[in-house]
Image (spheres, helix red, strand yellow):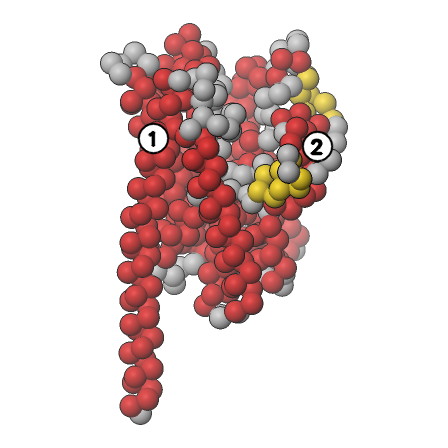
Amino acid sequence: MSKIRVNNISKIDRKNRNILFCKIATVILSIVLICMSFNLFLNQYYEPKEYTSDLSKHIKFGKEGNNLYSLMYVILGFLSSWPNPGFFIAIVLTFFVVFSVWATKKLLSFFCPDTDKWILWVYALICNMSFPIQITLTENHSVRGYMTSNVYHNSTYLAMKPLAFLVIYYFFTLKDKYVEKPLKIKQWFIFTGLMLITTAFKPNFIIGFSLAMLITMIYDFIKNKFKSVLNFIIMGTTVFPSIILVYYQQSTLFDEKSEMKFGYFVALEELTSQVRGHIYIYLLMSFLFAFIIAAVCFKEFFTDSCYAFSWVFLLVNMFFATFLYETGPRATHGNFLWAAYFAAGFILAVSIAKYDKLIKEEKITCMIVSSAVLGAQFFSWLNYMIELCNGRVPYR
């Protein structure tokens, strides 16, 4: 009896130590992320030649009233008229970085309802402080995975990312309910509104999401033996306002000099000369952690519909990134890659949730391997941010 009591006390002490460690880690990681992000955005404003980004263009669009494509142009145009605008613009962009951490934690809470909130905060921070591992192929040539959600040169993407996490979170909360009964008016407006405001900041997310949502709904409809047709129709109408908005936004993207074409890895190789000839190595580096978790949790593709949706969403967006590209003035803009960038972060977050489950099940070998990869991705991000903040890496 005393042995059992001692063991229970030992487990409680260990749990309390882990939570204390996570509290300290949350504070430290938050300070690092906020300080490095603010410094980077400040440099992007005041020294645009050394810290290449889209920020100066987006501010210009906001000043000129070219606001059709993104609400971020409105915000930047407004802030640019303030005294010391660079300071306030850096604060707003840093806010969206922090907002993304909170939204990631919200999504993780759906998958890990029994996990302590401080552990979830650490997971959310790691997800937003992760970068694919760099591999040195020769003395003068190295490859660093490119597909990451942690992209800092584009203000419209920074605003879209946390909102997109919230869209998917809310979709998951509705996913198993709408089949049984139609969405309530409040649910319809919240879900539709989230998608609409996400699209208003950047249109790229909604196309891949709506297609992945359609595939999931078709599967659910068949599984439900073609019943409750009205429920599925009502759920499907939630994407219509965002699709209409995208129709108007596309006039900013395409003109008579630009067009969309099909090709194989054209957009990726146009933007990433470093991966020419090494595209599959690069993709492996981009999704290594998710692949490891998927190999261990393969059965959950058939038992966890939200996990299955996560991979469908990734595959849909990777299809666009792989086969679609633009010609003309926007050939190097990579407009079909943004959703894939987000999908890379989304699958990382979902994989971290499965990683948490493996820890609870004490699957030691998988824990060691996946922890090593996740740790390497964190230090790759830290190294990359140091390079970015010192103006040594172009663009991203």
Q: Nearer the viewer, residue 237 or 359?
A: 359
Which part of the image, by quadrant, shows the N terminus?
A: bottom left
Q: Is residue 118 left or right of residue 382?
A: left
Quarter of the view holding residue 206:
top right
Q: Is residue 21 visible?
A: yes
Amino acid type, residue under disc 1 in the picture: Phe
Furthest residue toward left: 83
Q: Residue at x 69, y 38 (%)?
A: 279
Q: Is residue 170 visible?
A: no
Q: Secondary structure at mark 1?
A: helix
Furthest residue toward bottom: 1
| Location of residue 6 in the rendering, given as x and y in whole percent from the top left corner | 30, 84
Q: Which residue is mark 1?
A: 38
Count of numbered badges drawn on the protein: 2
Q: Residue at x 52, y 57 (%)?
A: 372
| Location of residue 123 in the rendering, given as x and y in whole percent from the top left corner | 42, 52
> What's the CA distance linking mark 2 and mark 1?
33 Å
Q: Nearer the viewer, residue 62 or 295?
A: 295
**Sequence-wise, which precedes: disc 2 or disc 1?**
1
The numbered dot on residue 202 is: none
Q: Residue at x 33, y 37 (%)?
A: 34
Amino acid type, residue under disc 2 in the picture: Arg
Q: Which residue is mark 2?
A: 276
Q: Nearer the viewer, residue 264 or 136?
A: 136
Q: Is residue 8 above or below residue 250?
A: below
Q: Secondary structure at mark 2?
A: loop
Q: Residue at x 33, y 44 (%)?
A: 30
Badge 2 local density, few (<14 within 10 Å), some, or many (20+)? Answer: some
Badge 1 local density, few (<14 within 10 Å), some, or many (20+)? Answer: many
